[in-house]
Each structure stands twice: as C-alpha cells, then as structure tokens.
Image: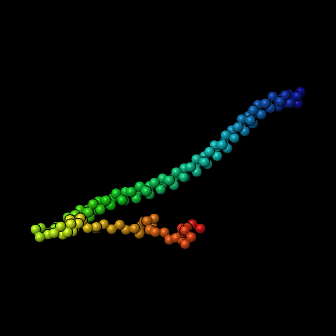
Amino acid sequence: MASGSLAANTAGQSPILLARINEKKAELENLKQLRDLSGALAGQMQVLEEKLATLSDGTEAVATVLGNWHSVLQAISMASMKIPKPKEGPEIEDAQKEQDAELELPQTLVRIPTEHAPMLQPQPSSGDGTKAGEE
C-alpha cells in the first residue's frame, strides 16, 4: 500500500510540477527579452551620451563667440572714433570730395585667427579629385 500511495502522490504532483515548470520557462523567456531590451537601451544611451557631448562642445563654442563680441564691438568703436576728418575748403573738387567720403569709413582692425579652426583651412587634395583622407 505504501508504494501505491507513493505512485498516486507522484501522479497527483505531476500536473502541479508541470505547471510550475511551464511557469518558470515563461519567466525565463521574459527575463531573456528583458536582457535583450536592456542591452539595446544601454546602446541607445551611449549614442545619446555622444550626441550630448557634441552638443555641449558646440554650446561652448557659441558661448566663446558671443563672449568675443564685446571685444569686436569695442574695436569697432575705437576705429570709429579715429576716423580722419575731411578738410573743409571751397577749392576741393568733386573727386576730392568722393575720396574724402571714402576715408570716413573706419579702418579694419579686427583680425580673425584661423589656426584654431582647421575646418576653415584648405584641405590638401590629390590630382584625381579625391580628398587626401579618402582612400
């Protein structure tokens, strides 16, 4: 009788065990999907980090340019204050008046260095029409 009750007990637990095994298989499948989606999300976050770093660098460049405008406007103001005054007199001819009118413009005082901007400098190219870096 003991062996008969053991067989009945095992047969009674079998559907419960099968249900639990199927439940664990479904849980495992969900965990695998979660792992794959987490990996994809991590990759997207790295791309976003790179784009934000580029955006940050661009913002710093814009801030530098805007910070330099005070110096540019100050140089223009200095140039405007030192405009040569045309000579007054009845003997000045029309050509002389035009030349004096041209002298009233301020002289160019602002120099823009380009050694810090390699994209603005001409790129060496080979004779076949391709850029040097494209081979």
Extreme-left residue of the structure: 90
Quarter of the rendering occupied by the C terminus: bottom right
Where, by quadrant of the figure, is residue 111 drawn? bottom left
108 up-or-down from 61: above or below: below
Extreme-bottom residue of the structure: 127
Of 17 and 135, which appears nearest the observer? 135
Residue at the image point whose x is 52% and y is 70% from the top: 125
Quarter of the rendering occupied by the N terminus: top right
37 displayed left or right of 105: right
Percent across and percent down for residue 14 are: 80, 32
27 displayed left or right of 55: right
Residue at the image point whose x is 47% and y is 56% from the top: 54
Q: Is residue 2 visible?
A: no
Percent across and percent down for residue 48 are: 52, 51
Percent across and percent down for residue 119 are: 45, 65
16 up-or-down from 96: above or below: above
Q: Is residue 3 visible?
A: yes
90 up-or-down from 67: above or below: below
